[in-house]
């Protein structure tokens, strides 16, 4: 029933611990972004930027969320 406060924005959200990247414009309830919480996530303006942060800062393989990042 709940989407994150940033749902619908043209921004990407990365989960620091899992490396999962969400596209907020297509956010779905299945994304469970509210469970991740602001302390464990970060917003970026592009998928590439999010993937770079996941790789370089959190040393995790970036993965596109299957619910909101489908082409
Ligand atoms: Zn998602």
Image (cartoon, rainbow, N blue to C red):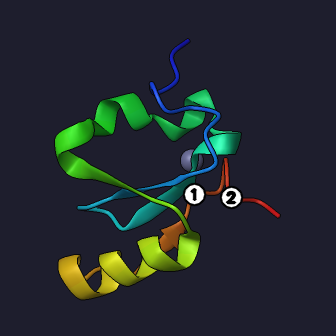
Q: Residue at x 57, y 57 (%)?
A: 65
Quarter of the image for the N terminus: give it.
Answer: top right
Q: Does the numbered disc 2 mark a residue whose Cβ is under 8 Å from ligand 1?
A: yes
Q: Residue at x 48, y 61 (%)?
A: 21
Point out which mark residue 38 bears. none
Q: Residue at x 56, y 71 (%)?
A: 47
Residue 31, image x, y percentages: 53, 40
Q: Tell me if mark 1 has few (under 14), some (14-19) or many (20+) residues whose alpha carbon lies within 10 angstroms of its own.
A: some
Horizontal side, residue 1 vs residue 26: left or right: left
Horizontal side, residue 3 vs residue 23: left or right: left
Q: In the rendered image, which residue does mark 1 sit on?
A: 65
Q: Does the numbered disc 1 mark a residue whose Cβ is under 8 Å from ligand 1?
A: yes
Residue 46, image x, y percentages: 56, 68
Above or below, 34 relative to 48 = above
Q: In the rendered image, which residue does mark 2 sit on?
A: 69
User: Closer to the camera, 62 or 25?
Assistant: 25
Above or below, 26 relative to 29 = below
User: Closer to the camera, 24 or 68?
Assistant: 24
Would you say the residues marked 2 and 1 are in contact, meaning their CB atoms lie under 8 Å apart? yes
Q: Tell me if mark 2 has few (under 14), some (14-19) or many (20+) residues whose alpha carbon lies within 10 angstroms of its own.
A: some
């Amino acid at each position: 029933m709940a989407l994150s406060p940033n749902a619908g924005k043209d921004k990407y959200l990365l989960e620091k611990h899992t490396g999962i990247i969400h596209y907020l414009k297509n956010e779905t309830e299945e994304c469970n972004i509210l469970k991740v919480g602001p302390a464990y996530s970060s917003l970026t303006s592009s998928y590439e930027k999010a993937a770079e942060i996941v790789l370089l800062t959190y040393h995790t393989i970036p993965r596109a969320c299957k619910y909101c990042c489908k082409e």
